[in-house]
Image (spheres, grey):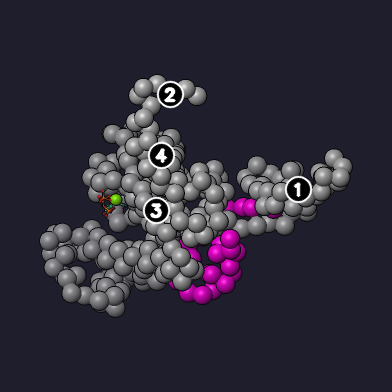
């Protein structure tokens, strides 16, 4: 294509290809959600509607991008793990971050009325996005452990804080002062002796966050005939070119059906990673 005299400006665009053979973690975080949650009357400490809406947007992203095998969400953030070998957008960083962040945000807005039928959006929410590359399984596991440990710390604090305010009649300043310097055991005790709340019995959704895993299913019927909530992904190209029939059969054999499951489980211990070892495969 012949360029105009202005076309040289294209040369100023720098390549931003992400290192090959590394795990990509994309984390999205609600921008100024302290304000956004206040303005939309989110329930404290946890708003089920808001969390379910985040989950919905995250699942939509996984449905669209099959290279995401795992997602973890809490509060106003979501992290997504992409396959080590993903060739998504030729691993161009800005393209991946901007497109996925944009889709997540539009899904959040698109599905808002389903979760908040009586609360009109006051203004358009936005999310920031970043990608961090991790060289090995160890860092990937520690990354997700870090996020879930954060969920635990924040949720325990917030649960104790709002119990003191909402049920204990304390001011927010008093509640902060009571909790200052306390360790985990003290907060459990405040909740139990003060409010008969057994923290360990609180909905695991709040204590553990949301975990989406893509799992392979072994369907009885050919993958082509699977129900609509099941994604089908061709993992290897068709090898046989001998005949159309043979090729079709081969294709059916090579197709792997996947499903996206929502869990609220521990992702720090070995059990999870042993069970879903395929998440770390290429
Ligand atoms: P930036 O991310 O730096 O733009 O700031 P932020 O205001 O979004 O804060 P941050 O991401 O650190 O924390 C998320 C904030 O969202 C929390 O501090 C809460 O104020 C709010 N939030 C998230 N989930 C809930 C919820 O379920 N209920 C309520 N009431 N607030 C929530
Ligand atoms: Mg935020």
Q: Which residue is mark 1?
A: 238
The residues tagged by marks 2 and 1 sit, at their Cα atoms, a distance apart of 40 Å
The residues tagged by marks 1 and 4 sit, at their Cα atoms, a distance apart of 34 Å
Which residue shows up at 58% across the image and 67% down it? Answer: 277
Q: Left or right: 239 with respect to 257?
A: right
Residues shaded magenta: 255-282
Give yes or no for residue 123 being in the magenta stretch.
Answer: no
Depth-wise, is mark 1 or mark 4 nearer the camera?
1
Q: Which residue is mark 4?
A: 102
Which quarter of the picture shows residue 187? bottom left
Depth-wise, is mark 2 or mark 3 nearer the camera?
2
Circle 4 — which element? helix
Q: Above or below — where is 58 with respect to 268?
A: above
Q: Which residue is mark 2?
A: 3
The residues tagged by marks 4 and 2 sit, at their Cα atoms, a distance apart of 31 Å
At label 1, counting other C-alpha atoms closer than 10 Å, the crowd grade (few under 14, some 14-19, many 20 or more) is: some
Residue that sits furthest to the bottom in the current view: 185
Q: Which residue is mark 3?
A: 131
Report x, y in % for residue 142.
41, 69
In this view of the protein, which residue sits in the foreground, 24 or 168?
Answer: 24
Q: CB at mark 3 closer than 8 A to ligand 1? A: no
Q: Are marks 1 and 4 in contact (CB under 8 Å)?
A: no
Q: Earlier in the sequence, mark 2 or mark 1?
A: 2
Report x, y in % for residue 209.
42, 60
């Amino acid at each position: 294509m012949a360029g105009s005299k202005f076309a040289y400006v294209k040369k100023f665009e720098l390549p931003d290809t992400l290192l090959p053979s590394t795990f990509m973690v994309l984390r999205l975080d609600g921008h100024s959600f302290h304000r956004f949650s206040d303005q939309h009357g989110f329930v404290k400490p946890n708003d089920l509607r808001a969390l379910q809406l985040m989950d919905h947007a995250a699942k939509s992203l996984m449905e669209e991008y099959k290279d995401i095998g795992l997602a973890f969400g809490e509060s106003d953030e979501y992290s997504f793990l992409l396959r080590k070998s993903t060739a998504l957008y030729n691993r161009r960083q800005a393209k991946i971050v901007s497109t996925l962040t944009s889709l997540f945000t539009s899904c959040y807005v698109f599905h808002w009325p389903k979760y908040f039928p009586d609360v009109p959006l006051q203004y358009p929410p936005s999310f920031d996005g970043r990608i961090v590359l991790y060289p090995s399984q160890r860092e990937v596991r520690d990354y997700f452990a870090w996020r879930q440990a954060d969920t635990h710390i924040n949720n325990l604090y917030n649960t104790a804080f709002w119990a003191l305010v909402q049920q204990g009649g304390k001011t927010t300043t008093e509640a902060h002062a009571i909790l200052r310097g306390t360790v985990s055991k003290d907060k459990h005790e405040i909740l139990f002796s003060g409010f008969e709340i057994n923290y360990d019995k609180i909905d695991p959704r709040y204590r553990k966050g949301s975990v989406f895993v893509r799992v392979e299913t072994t369907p009885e019927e050919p993958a082509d005939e699977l129900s609509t909530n099941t994604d089908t992904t061709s993992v290897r190209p068709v090898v046989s070119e001998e005949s159309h029939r043979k090729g079709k059969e081969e294709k059916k054999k090579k197709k792997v059906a996947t499903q996206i499951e929502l869990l609220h489980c521990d992702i720090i211990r070995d059990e999870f990673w042993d069970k879903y070892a395929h998440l770390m495969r290429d």
